[in-house]
Image: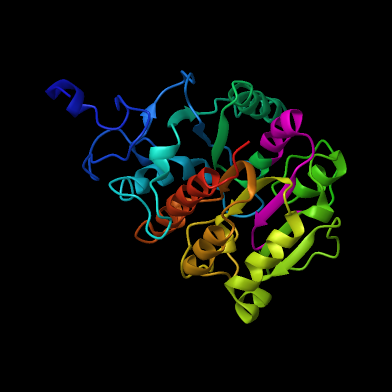
Amino acid sequence: MNDKEKVVQGSNKKELYGSSTDAMYGGILTFMRRRYSRELAGVDVAVTGIPFDTATTNRPGARFGPGGIRAASTNLAWARLDDWGFDAFDQLSVVDYGDCEFDHGMPQAIPDQIQAHAAAILSQDVALLSLGGDHFVTYPVLKAHAEIHGPVSLIHFDAHSDTWEDPDERIDHGTVFFRAAEDGIVVPARSVQIGLRTYNESDCGFNIIKAPWVHEQGIKAVVEEVKRIVGGNKCYLTFDIDCLDPSMAPGTGTPVIGGLSTHQAQQILRGLAGINLVGMDLVEVAPAYDVGDITSLAGATLALEMLYLYASKPSA
């Protein structure tokens, strides 16, 4: 690598494989210092930002989540994650695809634009890791996955069920999985929601593991229950950062005390190694409310764990 290439750290990475040793504090901020590219030949996973937050019901700001997560990820890019026994970037070719583009002045057109963005990536036989944005973005992304994979099992980490009922024309981050169940793009009976601690009388048929149960029964029991529910089904994993307790993730729009610790979340994800994962997202990081970037760091780390989880899936 010559001196000119060294200046543009991250985005000018030549190799699709391998971890990066670029300085944490400089360079262009791609996720995990991966190559910035929309050329997907030879790529296994594309990471994309979806900076949309106008469906939020409380504090906005998750449109800055993809940027915050990317910046925090530079702290992780220098070495493989501990305990997995391998480097995900030795097994997966991963690029940062950049962000989904849309016009906030045309709100009713945005869901279709997000779905088309996701579909363009998936159509090239490339898996997708999306960085939100508020939790509404999962809905059009899920629709794009269902077009290829059919109805999937959902593994959903959150403080809220997001199954409140609403008219179809509303764009709201609290109705995402009501809509997904109603559309038949997820299979509620083979899906699970983890970390919930807010009341909703409608569960839409999803299996629910509430946060107190996680604390009382422990990580191993949660992993066993999730694997029992989803079995070998194709799975989509979505992680709302407010699943974590606000002491560990204050930078989010609707924080709720009593949540999971970063340790619990990380170990549950690691325990799910071997599931048939087809897509994943990390949403609701809102850096403006953060303290010392700990929420962005948690989001970046959990998103990275998802890549390791994807690398652990059974061979086709």
Q: Residue at point 60% right, 68% down?
A: 256
Q: Is residue 120 magenta?
A: no
Residue 258 in view (yes/no): no
Type of colouring: rainbow
**Looking at the rendering, which quadrant does residue 36 occupy?**
top left
Residue furthest left in the image: 3
Where 293 sits versus 184, above or below? below
x and y percentages locating residue 51 in the rendered image: 53, 37
Q: Residue at point 60% right, 78% down?
A: 215
x and y percentages locating residue 165 in the rendered image: 84, 51
Residue furthest bottom in the image: 216
**Looking at the rendering, which quadrant does residue 255 occupy?**
bottom right
Q: Residue at point 79% right, 43% down?
A: 180
Q: Nearer the viewer, residue 218 or 26?
A: 218
Relative placement, left or right, of 125 versus 37 is: right
Relative placement, left or right, of 199 versus 1 is: right
**The C terminus sits in image quarter:** top right
**The N terminus sits in image quarter:** top left
Residue 291 in view (yes/no): yes
Where 234 sits versus 116, above or below? below
x and y percentages locating residue 158 in the rendered image: 64, 59
Q: Nearer the viewer, residue 280 or 98?
A: 280
x and y percentages locating residue 299 in the rendered image: 47, 52
Range of the magenta residues?
A: 139-163
